[in-house]
Image (tube, helix red, strand yellow):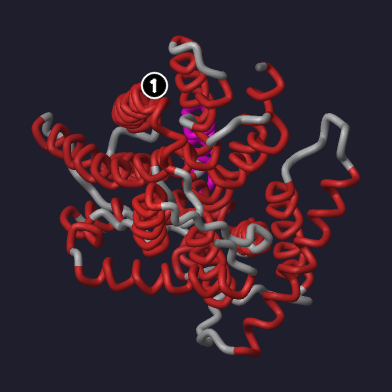
Amino acid sequence: MEFNAIFTLLVAVAVLVIGQLAVRRIGLLREFNIPVPVVGGLIATIVITALRPMGFNVSFFDGLQEPFMLLFFGSIGLGADFRMIAAGGRKLILFFVLVAVLLVLQDALGVGIAAAFGLDPLLGLLGGSITMSGGHGTGAAWAKVFGDQHGIEGAFELAMACATFGLVFGSLVGGPAAHFLIRRMKKNGVAVHTSEPETEAEAIAAGGGDGQTQGVATANVLPALLVLLIGIAAGYGLRDLTYGTAFYLPTFVWVLFTTIVLGNLGRMTGIYRPHGESVSEIGYLSLSVFLALALMSLKLWELAGLALPILAILVAQLVLVFVYTTQITFRAMGGNYDAAVLVAGNCGFGMGATPTAIANMQAVTDRHGPSRLAFIIVPVVGGFLIDIANAFIIKGFIAFL
């Protein structure tokens, strides 16, 4: 049975509604911050997989995924305000360097274990920073590249499985890691102090940047959508222009760059100031539809032969993130309360996504007190800097392999 574009979109929206109902009714899903499209998409693909032996095969229209994916990455770029980097100062730069090192370690670990099992090293990259620090969106984007350009079968299914594992365990590990560090600080007689805004820039960053308080409305959404589409068109142009050269990057990476430039030029010149709520809403909706479209097309049966090596990679990644953040990130960031909260955030987006990181930090600060510095640094690094660094690190590993 083949679905055209309209019926495919209909199923995707139905999947999102099912996922929304499941998250509302199942407390465990809310506790671990499992996204609605992930829940709905996995339910759909399990049902479709169960029906397959009965001769019920479904084929969805695949032309919708890329536009929604690019709108999502464009929204990340458009919301990336360079003033937030200034607000974080040297601490933000240091944290970004630490995160970049972790990206390299994640990829080296994934490639090494894949090679030990006799698998294509590129499969190790999919179990590395692509899905651990990149999440479902980045995983799906690179999986398409690996499938189309490197002939890796089952790349998409593998990426989704790894990203889901990371999302769950990023939620499980982050809070306990921070609590462990805070308890150790108290046991050693180290004062647990909280941070407050120290500069006007920090206060602006913590309060949302442009200070726009208008809600989402057509007047705010249309300009944002126009700029996003201009950025996507420019991204396609740059991808085609660099094709076959050392500067070639996947389309979504170029779109990330073009929208970052457009957004910040608009802010600097005053021509256009991205409305934060509208950009976020477009991005969230685009990611939700994209993930629903992607996940309901999963072919779970293609993962059967990779279960053991992939599980080994994922467990190793879990240990790496916990040890690295608690022993290196914590100490390098000062070994204080802010550093402990940053560890919770780093575990969140180092294995899952930025929303997971924020939820982890919120759980810690609700119990132990605020950390203004952490809530400035993590959204900037986890929200867009990590995607830029990840793109170059992954491309470097691919070139080396």
Query: How many numbered marks, from 0 up?
Result: 1
Quarter of the picture holding the C terminus: top right
Query: Is residue 373 among what the camera can see?
Result: no
Instruction: Name the kind of residue labelled 1 in the image.
Output: Pro
Identify the residue at image location x=81%, y=54%: 236
Judging depth in this view, the residue of 3 and 384 nearest the camera is: 3
Residue 90 falls inside the magenta stretch: yes
Please identify the residue farthest to the left as the structure is shown: 187
Identify the residue at image location x=58%, y=46%: 385
Quadrant of the rendered structure where residue 162 is?
A: top left
Q: Which residues are magenta?
A: 88-102
Query: Is residue 130 among what the camera can see?
Result: yes
Identify the residue at image location x=46%, y=50%: 377
Residue 296 falls inside the magenta stretch: no
**In-image side of 334 versus 14 (left or right):** left
- Look at the numbered disc 1 and give the secondary structure of its residue: helix
Quadrant of the rendered structure where residue 81 is?
A: bottom right
**In-image side of 365 versus 343 (left or right):** left
User: Which secondary structure is most common in the magenta stretch?
Assistant: helix
Judging by the rendered image, the residue that carries numbered circle 1 is: 309
Identify the residue at image location x=28%, y=42%: 174
User: Where does residue 366 sit, x and y in percent of width and height?
Assistant: 20, 60
242 over 371 or under it: above or below: above
